[in-house]
Image (cartoon, grey):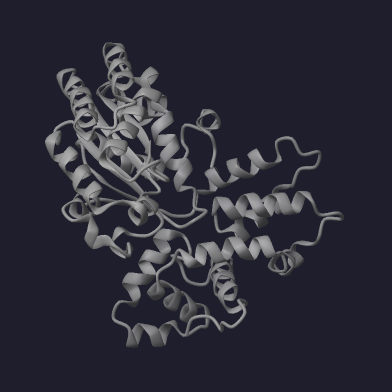
Amino acid sequence: MNTPKAIQNFPKTYRAKEMRILAQWLRAGESGSVVGLPGCGRNNLLNFLCYRPDVLRGEYLGSEADQIVVIPVDLSHLPTNDAATLYRVILRAFYWLRQQLPDTLQERVTALYLENRATQDPFLAQSGLYEMLLAFRSEGVRVALVLNRFDQFCQEADPRMFATLRSLRDSFKEVLSLIVGLHRDIIYLPNRQALGDLYPVLDNNVCWIGSMSEADSRWVIQQAIHAAPERPGEVEIEQILALSGGFPTLLRFITGWWLNQTPKPPLDRWLSLLSGEPLFEHRLKELWDGLTQEEQSILAVTFAGKNQVATRVKPDYQRILSHLVTKGVAANRPGLADEQQIMGRFYRATRSQPGKTGPE
């Protein structure tokens, strides 16, 4: 994951498709979930959303951006699992981004955070956060809290904390929205019932993060080779694009792998050589494990050439395949060998595990 400082170097057109969706949510004050497989770049997208207000203003929201602030809140590994800590962490998130806030709010945010940062009393911490949001309301500024790694938070959080978030959103519905980052759709959370009334708030809008556009993929490659003494030519870059499927984790790995090869292997050997790299297989397995069991099964039968049979016997085949296309792991056009190769590598990644024969 890139640091906020590194995010400043991202092109303004980065993840334009997804940014347009998220900008619509911000404009409408909508909450929702941002879902993407491990290694798809979800963290970078959410950081880009939070730390590039210049892009929101210049490319998506125009002057409306002056009345909207996007605050990243790290809920992973909370020091303690209680409401007071949750309130103080949110207060701190505002404080850390105070320089991005309108001048009229910076002093108030600083004062409220410093006043409440040491309190163990949940009522005082809640009151401090409520006062802060009242200040935003009085200035006509809307707030979107971005809660990345929300699935990890769900595994650790006390169920009452979900009710706390829902109550916070309901109390300031006209100025507050929640955007959460997940590896899988919220319906697949093992304890989704614990979300209670928060569930429909987050499930109402979903932004799927798939593979990157060619322009973004080429930018990732250029970032990886900017200091390298030897650079790949256009043919090699096209091969990297094809074999990576546009996933950032694979783009970076394949580019780094090519830079370390001496002598450079011919193009027709890349796939077989990469398949023997444990770290490459590990990245594929992470992507594979991010899929649901249904998606893994559909991917397997499609790769095995049994998709016509699956179409007849599984009514949901086309729906699931459509999800795979959105996630970037299936071709949206038949007969494209490169997209089929990445599906095949997902399939082989599971079959190669000891004691496993892959999905059937």
Residue 191 x, y percent position in the rendering = 29, 62
Please report the residue visible at 31 percent of the width from the left and 28 percent of the height from the top.
Answer: 91
Please report the residue visible at 27 percent of the width from the left and 19 percent of the height from the top.
Answer: 112
Q: Nearer the viewer, residue 88 or 66?
A: 88
Q: Is residue 244 left or right of residue 58?
A: right
Residue 151 x, y percent position in the rendering = 37, 54
Q: Is residue 217 left or right of residue 190?
A: right
Count all numbered tags in the image, as a single digit.
0
Q: Where is residue 281, by image quadrant?
A: bottom right
**Residue 175 visible (yes or no):** yes
Q: Nearer the viewer, residue 143 or 299?
A: 143
Q: Where is residue 332, by image quadrant?
A: bottom left
Please report the residue visible at 33 percent of the width from the left and 25 percent of the height from the top.
Answer: 117
Residue 15 x, y percent position in the rendering = 44, 42
Q: Is residue 86 left or right of residue 338?
A: left
> Does residue 107 lie above or below 316 as drawn?
above
Q: Where is residue 190, by image quadrant?
A: bottom left
Residue 260 x, y percent position in the rendering = 79, 51
Q: Nearer the viewer, residue 76 or 243?
A: 76
In this view, the residue farthest toward the front is 120
